[in-house]
Amino acid sequence: MKQIIKSVALTAYLSFNATLNNYNRNIIKSEYEIYNKLIPGRTSGDIDQFGTFWDYTDTAYAKVNLTLHLDANVNVSEDYLNLCSLIQKICWGDDVYVKRISANESHILSQNYSQTQDGDYLLLIDETFQGSGNAHKHFPLDSTNLISKALNVTRQEDEKFLVLTRKKVPAGTGFGGGSADAAVILRHCTNQDNMKLIGSDVPFLASNYNVGLVTGIGDKIIPIDDITLDEMHEYIYLLLVDDMSSTTDVFANARKMISNGTFKSTQFESIVESTISMARNFSNFVPQNDLTPCVLSPKVKRLYDILLEKYRNYKVGMTGSGSGLYIIGNNDKDITQVRNLYQDNLCIIKTKFKSGKNNGKCYTLL
């Protein structure tokens, strides 16, 4: 019996390591690794030769939920809860590179990288602050990745793809990194009918709006005029703790709170109206997120409590289901002092709201 248990354990161990090794094959250091495989003989100096290598490249701009309200009158057994959220794209995000590949190119790639179940290749350059050591936990390189789901919505019959993601936005932070990656695929196709099936943030992130009031299950978008922090000489500072937040767990907690009456029933239409009014008069904006008390991470709770106590003169909030927090302000020195109070790993990114005036990447690591 002991021998059988040992055999099963060994098989499981070897299977896990094989999966991990296959995964690590798809984590690369530079896109030139791909060029060298598919365009042998070229060097990194031949940069002009690679201009048409990709079918398209785009920035997957992240987002912040400036407000997020849950409808306490809903049936909690439904797959999705009804929400109302003021969502703003920001000038920070991943870079996504997409190429349709031939059968011969797929054969060449298969010698070095692992395919998804659909025959695509998802490769990763990990530039998140956690580092590539944890990448396998956060960015699936198989058909469960939202990128893969977006490809399945858009692909023609026998199309296969190579997708490289230069990852900056960590998973589980509420900044919509995975949804934004998938949105890049959808923005470059004509069939966008099923995008809401991929993720609730995807329709907004695939849209041309910089800011919008999103309601329902993410499928209804009310465009809002651009909010420019420049006029108030302010920035948005993103605070990323060294911890992930499970969206599933946070919403499970929210369902419990709705069921036991913790969330008070309100007229949801009035919340929509007041949020639109506040967005149009942003100087009176107050961050609100019903999911904040549902977060389970001690690190997020501790940092959020510090912000509420020590940064009362700033606009402070949590995005999505966490773990990301943000501060709207303009004093780098004051805001980076939070590290002395928090005394744990903390990434701080200074960026801007995406708008007509700020329509590209613009961020600084502090």
Image (spheres, rainbow, N blue to C red):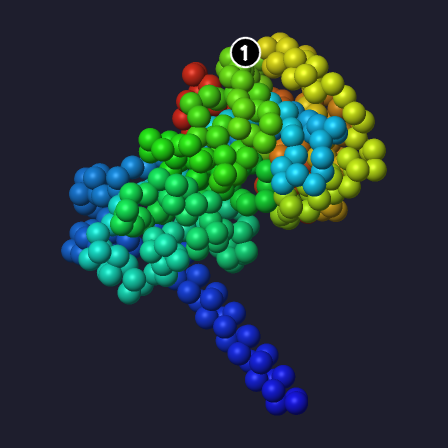
Q: Residue 165 at what x, y percent from top left?
A: 40, 45
Q: Looking at the image, which residue is at 46% across and 70% down?
A: 18
Q: Quadrant of the C terminus?
A: top right
187 or 267, nearer to the observer: 267
- Crowding at dot 1, Cα within 10 Å, few <14 / some 14-19 / many 20+, comes out as few
Q: Is residue 304 above or below residue 152?
A: above
Residue type at mark 1 is: Glu
Q: Is residue 159 visible?
A: yes
Residue 99 picture quarter: top left
Q: Quadrant of residue 33?
A: bottom left
Name the quadrant containing residue 106. Answer: bottom left
Screen quadrant of the N terminus: bottom right
The residue sitting at 50% across, 57% down in the picture is 136
Residue 237 visible to the viewer: no
Question: Label 1: which residue?
Answer: 231
Residue that sits furthest to the left in the current view: 41
> In the rendering, at what x and y percent does residue 11 appear?
53, 78
* Residue 53 relative to residue 341: left or right: left
Task: State left or right for residue 153 relative to residue 250.
Answer: left
Q: Secondary structure at mark 1?
A: helix
The one of 218 and 162 positioned closer to us in this rendering: 218
Vertical order, 364 against 248 (above or below)? above
Left or right of residue 106, residue 201 in this image: right
Q: Position of residue 47 (x, y in %)?
A: 22, 42
Q: Residue at x 63, y 84 (%)?
A: 5
- Report the label total: 1
Instruction: Report the residue at 65% width, 30% height from top.
Output: 82
Q: Is residue 87 above or below residue 130?
A: above
Task: Give the x, y percent position of residue 205.
Answer: 47, 30
